[in-house]
Image (cartoon, grey):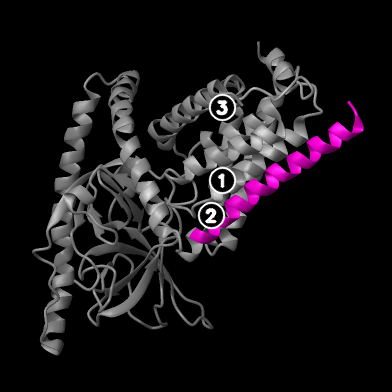
């Protein structure tokens, strides 16, 4: 990654953080709200492949952890796994369909929230699984579908794919432009 | 693509994810065992302090736009006025409800020759700036922090009763765990016999669970539960916490099944009081 890529990534993470904390945190149903920070690694994996998705997910997760009262490092772990797995799972897909990013976003967000709650429970906080997961999924998954395209546009601008061999960015860009 | 190049790329990819997972698990472990607590708290405080001005500035722009879009030209002023009135009403309700606690206290005086005392605790008035940033906790953020004398562990009251407890502080703000959070538990007393129980959160928007109520203990719907203030308690005595909503029991149960509704209206919190009181003080 070049220094320009790093600057663009920093800007995207900062913008999403501000949008999350000033707007999306207030949009509530059943105590849960849309989670744009969780979408960043998903869309990074989709746009730039597993390696960059994992690194981007780790960094965005650490940033998210700074503002969360949950165990520190949990979002970083989930972020890098989400970026990596999404990159691996979607690299063979043809990206001409407009509906593919929303579908990937919903599936990955649901998986990420489930893993987050399970790991939280393992770390001694069973309430994350017992009380909070259902409303988080009910709100987080549908909102991920709505937010997928704008987040993908931002991430694709910030985190380009490593080379022509991966072809993610070119294909993804073609689907969006 | 040559097979060797592909293998090298796969190995590098495996190495990247392995390193990131190990790094994440190391951070989680250090935080869990408290070994990096100082560094993590310092980083969190720094992040909050750096981000708060940006958040407030964007909030100032976004809130009026939202109010305008909702069709209320003077909605901002009305909201502020409404919030202040709600706070005053809450204080009056708290006074009225604490009378019930006072009656219990007078009865206790006869027996114990001691009066639970909560008056004179200094307070910091704070405004709720944000709701929980995580879907997995029930918290709010306030605009007063260590600069104004707020510290971890301090109780927060608002509306007609207890709101929660401060769990994180930075210089210009703090995070409060609400009484509805599943990790929250508050020791309470009730009734003429000053019976004790434990009120636990069940998640945002849900009733509280009242535990450790033995079968046959006289507890009625509508009764107000107040903080117990026992030695080493997390809260000072006689703060109204919740009103009993339902009481039921089964023949073989070892305790009554009791639910209660928080007295503070946690859905419309705007202004709250942070009590500058800490356990053991």
The answer to whether any part of residue A61 appears in the image is yes
Please give left or right for residue A121 compared with residue B197 in the image: right
Q: Tell me, for residue A76, which label it has, or none.
A: 1
Identify the secondary structure beneath mark 1. helix
Horizontal and vertical percent for residue B103? 14, 74
Asked if the residue at tag 1 contacts the one at tag 2, i.e. Cβ–Cβ closer than 8 Å, the answer is yes
Q: Between residues B206 and B222, which one lies in front from this camera angle?
A: B206
Q: Nearer the viewer, mark 3 or mark 2?
A: 2
Cα separation between marks 2 and 1? 9 Å
Identify the secondary structure beneath mark 2. helix
The answer to whether any part of residue A105 appears in the image is no
Q: Tell me, for residue B27, which label it has, or none.
A: 2
Please give left or right for residue B61 compared with residue A88 in the image: left
Q: Is residue B169 above or below residue A48?
A: below
Identify the secondary structure beneath mark 3. helix
Asked if the residue at tag 1 contacts the one at tag 3, i.e. Cβ–Cβ closer than 8 Å, the answer is no
**Magenta part of the chain:** B1-30
Q: Residues within 10 Å of mark 2 (few under 14, many from 20)?
A: many
Q: Per the image, is B24 magenta?
A: yes
Horizontal and vertical percent for residue B54? 32, 30
Q: Is residue B248 above or below residue B96?
A: below
Q: Per the image, is A101 magenta?
A: no
Label 3 sits on residue: A147
The residue lying furthest to the right in this view is: B3
Q: Between residues A157 and A43, which one lies in front from this camera angle?
A: A157
Q: Residues within 10 Å of mark 3 (few under 14, many from 20)?
A: some
Q: Earlier in the sequence, mark 3 or mark 1?
A: 1
Cα separation between marks 3 and 2? 30 Å
Where, by quadrant of the figure, is residue B239 drawn? Answer: bottom left
């Amino acid at each position: 990654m070049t220094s320009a890529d790093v600057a663009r990534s920093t800007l995207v993470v900062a913008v999403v953080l501000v949008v999350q904390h000033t707007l999306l945190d207030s949009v509530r149903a059943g105590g849960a709200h849309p989670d744009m920070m969780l979408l960043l690694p998903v869309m990074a994996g989709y746009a730039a492949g597993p390696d960059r998705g994992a690194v981007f997910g780790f960094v965005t997760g650490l940033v998210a952890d700074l503002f969360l009262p949950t165990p520190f490092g949990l979002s970083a772990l989930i972020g890098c796994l989400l970026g990596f797995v999404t990159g691996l799972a979607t690299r063979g897909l043809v990206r001409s369909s407009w509906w593919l990013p929303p579908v990937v976003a919903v599936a990955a967000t649901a998986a990420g929230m489930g893993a987050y709650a399970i790991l939280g429970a393992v770390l001694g906080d069973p309430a994350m699984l017992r009380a909070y997961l259902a409303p988080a999924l009910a709100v987080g998954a549908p909102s991920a579908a709505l937010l997928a395209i704008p987040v993908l546009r931002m991430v694709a601008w910030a985190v380009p794919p490593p080379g022509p061999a991966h072809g993610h960015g070119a294909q993804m860009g073609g689907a969006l432009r | 693509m040559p097979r060797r190049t592909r293998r090298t790329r796969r190995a590098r990819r495996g190495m990247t994810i392995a390193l990131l997972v190990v790094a994440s698990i190391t951070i989680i472990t250090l935080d869990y065992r408290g070994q990096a607590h100082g560094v993590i708290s310092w980083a969190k405080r720094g992040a909050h302090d750096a981000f708060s001005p940006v958040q407030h500035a964007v909030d100032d722009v976004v809130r009026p736009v939202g109010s305008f879009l909702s069709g209320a030209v003077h909605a901002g002023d009305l909201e502020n006025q409404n919030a202040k009135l709600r706070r005053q009403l809450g204080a009056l309700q708290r006074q009225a409800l604490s009378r019930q606690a006072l009656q219990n206290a007078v009865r206790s005086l006869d027996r114990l020759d001691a009066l639970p005392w909560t008056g004179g605790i200094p307070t910091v008035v704070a405004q709720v700036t944000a709701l929980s940033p995580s879907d997995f906790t029930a918290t709010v953020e306030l605009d007063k922090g260590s600069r104004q004398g707020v510290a971890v562990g301090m109780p927060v009251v608002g509306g007609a009763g207890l709101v929660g407890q401060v769990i994180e502080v930075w210089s210009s703000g703090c995070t409060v765990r609400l009484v509805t959070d599943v990790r929250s538990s508050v020791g309470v007393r009730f009734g003429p016999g000053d019976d004790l129980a434990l009120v636990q959160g069940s998640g945002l928007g849900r009733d509280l669970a009242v535990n450790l109520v033995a079968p046959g203990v006289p507890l009625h719907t509508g009764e107000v539960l107040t903080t117990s203030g026992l030695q080493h308690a997390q809260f000072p005595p006689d703060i109204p916490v919740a009103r009993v909503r339902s009481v039921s029991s089964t023949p073989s149960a070892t305790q009554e099944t009791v639910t209660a509704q928080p007295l503070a209206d946690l859905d419309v919190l705007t202004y709250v009081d942070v009590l500058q009181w800490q356990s053991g003080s």
